[in-house]
Amino acid sequence: MGRRPLSDPPCQGYCKTLPSERASRCGAISCPGIVFQQPANPLLLRMIQQRDRGGCQQAAQPSVASLSSRTLGIGGPGSGEVNDNWYDRHILPYLLEIACGVKSVRRQREKVVPLAEGRVLEVGIGTGLNMQHYDRSRVTKIVGLDPALQMHRLALKRIARAGLEVELVALSAENIAFDSASFNSVLITYTLCTIPDPVAALKEMRRVLMPGGRLIFCEHGRAPDESVSRWQDRLTPHWKKIAGGCHLNRNVPALLVEAGFECKLMQTMYLPGPRPLTYNYWGEAFAV
Ligand SMILES: C[S@@+](CC[C@H](N)C(=O)[O-])C[C@H]1O[C@@H](n2cnc3c(N)ncnc32)[C@H](O)[C@@H]1O
């Protein structure tokens, strides 16, 4: 089976942006159709080796995915407190697949993801549920950032099907190792609730956005009804233990403003389901 030529040679982005790290730290592991860059981080390397032992299912697919070695944030400061326990590795990704894949959430994705254009940074790409909703005629490249390696494995399958150029980066949003003003759009869906320091992360998103670029978001968060938000406050300490650090009670517009964004066209509503879990905010925000 023929190998599709890569538009990014191995290590290109990594070595350009982090000149202190040498290309020799990266090697290429390849399957026909997809090339992954081998990371210096042993955790990520282990995951890739496991994947390779299971064989490469993506061989016949037409897209290009590179798994970047910008893994310096994992386990260190600003690494997003990603756990590597059994539950988080084997159960949580599948629970998130179910919860984030329901019809009402899919409809939300359909409203926001096609707005992304040009060079896109998707923060907290998770298992890649947004992949099918991108407008291919508007997007040139997607960088998918997520510190949780257990999510990457599932995301790779969707990336392979999407026919888009995607670079997966194992890094936290609080410390984005990309140049300032290097993306046309930043997309974030159902991720702000989980990021340990959401304001720091949003400031980083603002930094990497080009002038005039937009943050496209769809998040669940604090409900306007006091009876609901009281429950959100009560439940959050317990909920976040089983839901990968998810906070039910974050005030999305307040966080955006605190990070220096101006919110435009924001809409809100409860999706079907338990009210403390389903109050949604979506729209676009611009750097002020
Ligand atoms: C509920 S999932 C949503 C995934 C995806 N955005 C979606 O819409 O299906 C939250 C995601 O945020 C990621 N995440 C957690 N902490 C993060 C951080 N500090 N920086 C970036 N992503 C983070 C998690 O690993 C997880 O994949």
Image (tube, rainbow, N blue to C red):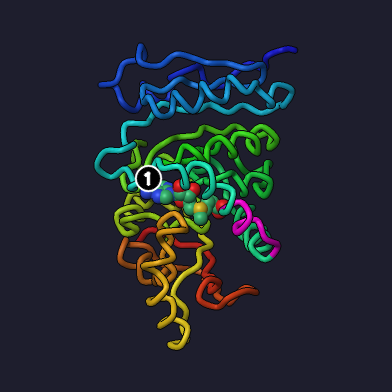
- Residue 57 x %, y %: 69, 26
In magenta, the rendered stretch is: 96-103
Q: Which residue is mark 1?
A: 82
Q: Quadrant of residue 39?
A: top left
Residue that appears at 38% across and 77% down: 234
What residue type is disc 1 on?
Answer: Val
- The crowding category of the residue bearing disc 1, from other C-alpha atoms within 10 Å (few below 14, some 14 to 19, many at least 20), is some
Q: Circle 1 sits in a helix, a strand or a loop, which is it?
A: loop
The x, y position of residue 109, in whole percent, is 63, 58
Using the image, determine if residue 11 lies above or below residue 177: above
Q: Residue at x 67, y 50 (%)?
A: 133
Q: Is residue 99 magenta?
A: yes
- Residue 213 shown in magenta: no
The number of callouts visible is: 1
Work out whether 43 lies above or below 251.
Answer: above
Left-right relation of 18 to 65 = left
Whether label 1 lies within 8 Å of ligand 1 gets the answer yes
Q: Main secondary structure of the magenta part?
A: helix
User: Considering depth in this image, is 178 or 37 the residue closer to the camera?
Assistant: 37
Image quarter where the N terminus lies is top right
Image coords of residue 101 (percent x, y): 65, 56
- Quarter of the rendering containing residue 115: bottom right
Residue 89 vs residue 195, the one in the foreground: 89
**Residue appearing at x 34%, y 47% in the figure:** 80
Q: Is residue 273 left or right of residue 261?
A: right
Taking the spot 38% from the left edge, 39% from the top edge, the residue there is 171
